[in-house]
Image (spheres, rainbow, N blue to C red):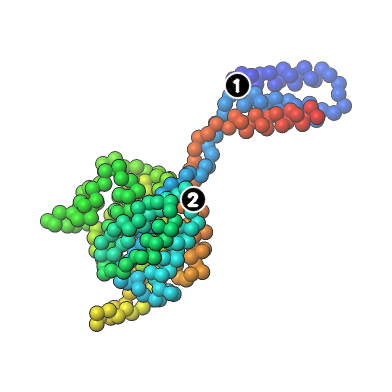
Amino acid sequence: MLWGLVLVPIVALSYWGFRGRNHGPAMLMLFGLSVLLLATTRPRAILLLPSRLETVMLAIDSSGSMRANDVLPSRIELAQIAAKKIVHEQPAFVKLGIVSVAGTAALVQAPTDKREDIHRAIDNLPLQRGSALGSGIVIALATLLPNAGLEVDKLINPEDSTRIASTSANVGVPKVKLEPASNTSAVIVLMSDGQGNMGPDALQMARVAADLGVRIFTIGFGTSEGTVLHAHGVSVRVKLDEAPLRRIAEITHGEYFRAVSSAEVQKIYESLGMRIVMQKHQLAEVTALLLILGMGLVLLAGG
């Protein structure tokens, strides 16, 4: 169809034989016809298009260290405020699920679009001893991708005789790997103070998520100075450990945020909201755009 552009110089030469006082409309008409001829070739272009987010899993740290009040009202309460903000701001068609992360991880709310159920699950998170961030990632992944072939038990509890970090990265993982961040319909938001001390290695599980194309956004609660917690006659200083949270986000092509106050929660969501709905480059036909442009120029020239 590009051979049709040969008509352009023919029309131009034909017009040149006429004596007119104003060549502007004629040149505009010629340009409009050129655009219309280009439209017949059904051109395509690479466009940046938003993808449709379908499911968000909130993995919330409910370990004892989240009782710390180095951020007010406390780490866990600030995390609950942030979680509810994320839930409230999602479009109605987006389903959300909740994973509680303590010494073990458990799905406390399967993905649903019923916001009242999600709020109830957030409010009823029980604080328990221990923090298995890696297990939380696995449970969230298994919920998001039930047909991905993840062997949850093997990932969370590798064989006792070979309980090493490298084992947890190889056992129970699907053989087919995707490009990191290639799954644009599902994401995980991990909310924690970063102090994981149980279960599989969180960074290894982040690599599993990356191999499945799932992004993990992390939000850290607490301060680098931390505070002293008193429990069962023992005093221990608990600090925000940002390094693993940053690394988890980096591995999965997500992003890390730090929450230090209720006022920061809104800013975090505004930033998170722009990134959580991923944009992707896609080859799309732009014939309609050229048709509109060409017809507009021809009508303007005719007027």
| Residue 19 makes an appearance in the image | yes
Judge whether 112 appears above or below 224 on screen. above
Residue beneath label 1, please?
2
Quarter the C terminus occupies: top right
Give me the residue at 39% from left, 65% from top.
123
Which residue lies most toward the left here?
A: 161
Judge whether 30 appears above or below 52 on screen. above
Q: What residue type is labelled 1?
A: Leu
In this rendering, position of residue 12 left or right of residue 20: left
Quarter the N terminus occupies: top right
Callout in the foreground (1, 2): 2
Is there a contact, CB below 8 Å, between mark 1 and mark 2?
Answer: no
Tell me, for residue 162, which label it has, or none.
none
Give me the residue at 68% from left, 18% from top.
7
Judge whether 138 appears above or below 45 on screen. below
Q: Which amino acid does label 2 sit on?
A: Ala
